[in-house]
């Protein structure tokens, strides 16, 4: 807090136009940024409050939904900050606008990757469902369609998210500095969310480990507790609880087919597939809605900037 006030004060005294700013304004900006960080911290703590036993069972469709919802909560806190400091996006300098717009593009790209992972799970679900229909008449063919869900290698070049351009020192006002500080927190949390989500859906650690490299440069203190809480689970390559249950149920049915006792096992898999499908639908709708919101916000900002330039 003290360090931030010192940075803001120094920035005020070194503005190129040498306008005088009352110290009270510095305090207001600092307090607004601190309030934003407090809001973000509360959102993260709420995410961490879900603490099942065993700990590995935190990786569920429900928790992924909470992670994605966190993006909306952080954005809401960010917009609240802009209102408090009376600094709408259309008043930003070019560097901040470019950074925010690029972040929006990254989110859209990452949401497409999430949709791709969900599509893979959906295809496996259909294969299981088709296998169920073959149990009675063609058990050997049914077994071919009941193979466990395996990790899907991510084709997303997450390292490409690293923006080599350092914007430090390019901001011409204290409000720009506050916006930049807030965007650092927002981006680090946003990228962390997608690292967790993509790793959980794919069943491999690569997306999370690469995303950790991306967010390391942001040096976000707010993320430390969250990362420490999840690192051992995600980095072990744990898969979603629902995927584990579906695989176990499919394996049980395969064993039952071999021994000629399929009734109970088939009913169990059918029930789990029904639950799995509903959870997938909810998550797919959430991803689609988030994609639409990010795209609409980005387009609205671009339109506003164009109108201001006219």
Image (spheres, grey):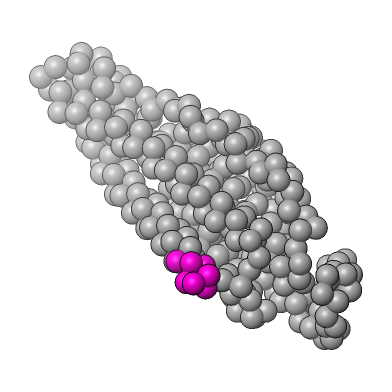
205 sits left or right of 118 in the view = right
- Image position, residue 176 (x, y; %): 71, 68
- Residue at far front of view: 310
Q: Give the range drawn in magenta.
A: 303-310
Q: Residue at x 31, y 37 (%)?
A: 122
Residue 256 shows in the view = no
Establish if 101 lies above or below 256.
Answer: below
Extreme residue toward the left, this view = 137
Q: Which residue is drawn at 67% across and 71% down?
A: 36
Give the vertical position of 225 relative to 80 (above or below): above
Q: Along the line of sight, which residue is nearer the eye, 14 or 59?
A: 14
Give residue 95's position: percent from left, percent from top. Answer: 66, 58
Image check: 259 left or right of 40?
left
Number of numbered discs = 0
Residue at 63% from the left image edge and 68% from the top image edge = 92
Viewer-side residue, 278 vs 152: 152
Between 202 and 265, the one lying in front of the other is 202
Name the residue nearer the viewer: 232 or 262.
232
Image point (52%, 54%), residue name: 104
Q: In which quarter of the image is the N terminus?
A: bottom right
Q: x and y percent of residue 238 in the render?
A: 54, 34
- Left or right, 67 with reference to 94: left
Can residue 191 be seen?
A: yes
Q: Does the magenta stretch include residue 38?
A: no
Q: Quadrant of residue 180?
A: bottom right
Relative height, residue 282 to residue 139 (above, below): below
Majority secondary structure in the magenta region: helix
Q: What percent of the width, then of the height, locates residue 142? A: 21, 20
């Amino acid at each position: 807090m003290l360090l931030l006030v010192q940075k803001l004060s120094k920035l005020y005294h070194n503005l190129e136009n040498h306008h005088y700013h009352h110290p009270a304004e510095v305090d207001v900006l600092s307090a607004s940024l601190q309030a934003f960080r407090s809001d973000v911290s509360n959102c993260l703590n709420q995410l961490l409050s879900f603490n099942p036993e065993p700990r590995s069972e935190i990786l569920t469709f429900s928790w992924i939904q909470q992670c994605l919802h966190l993006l909306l909560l952080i954005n809401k806190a960010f917009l609240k900050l802009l209102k408090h400091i009376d600094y709408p996006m259309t008043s930003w300098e070019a560097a901040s606008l470019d950074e925010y717009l690029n972040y929006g593009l990254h989110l859209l790209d990452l949401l497409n990757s999430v949709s791709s992972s969900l599509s893979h799970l959906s295809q496996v679900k259909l294969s299981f469902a088709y296998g169920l229909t073959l149990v009675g008449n063609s058990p050997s063919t049914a077994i071919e369609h009941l193979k466990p869900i395996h990790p899907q290698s991510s084709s997303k070049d997450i390292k490409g998210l690293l923006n080599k351009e350092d914007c430090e020192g390019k901001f011409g006002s204290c409000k720009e500095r506050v916006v930049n500080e807030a965007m650092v927190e927002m981006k680090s949390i946003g990228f962390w969310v997608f690292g967790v989500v993509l790793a959980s859906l794919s069943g491999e650690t690569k997306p999370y480990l690469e995303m950790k490299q991306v967010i390391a440069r942001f040096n976000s203190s707010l993320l430390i507790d969250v990362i420490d809480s999840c690192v051992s689970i995600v980095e072990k390559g744990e898969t979603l609880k629902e995927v584990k249950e579906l695989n176990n149920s499919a394996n049980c049915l395969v064993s039952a087919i071999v021994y000629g006792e399929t009734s109970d096992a088939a009913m169990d898999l059918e029930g789990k597939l029904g639950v799995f499908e509903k959870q997938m639908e909810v998550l797919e709708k959430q991803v689609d809605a988030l994609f639409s919101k990010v795209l609409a916000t980005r387009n609205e900002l671009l339109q506003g900037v164009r109108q201001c330039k006219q």
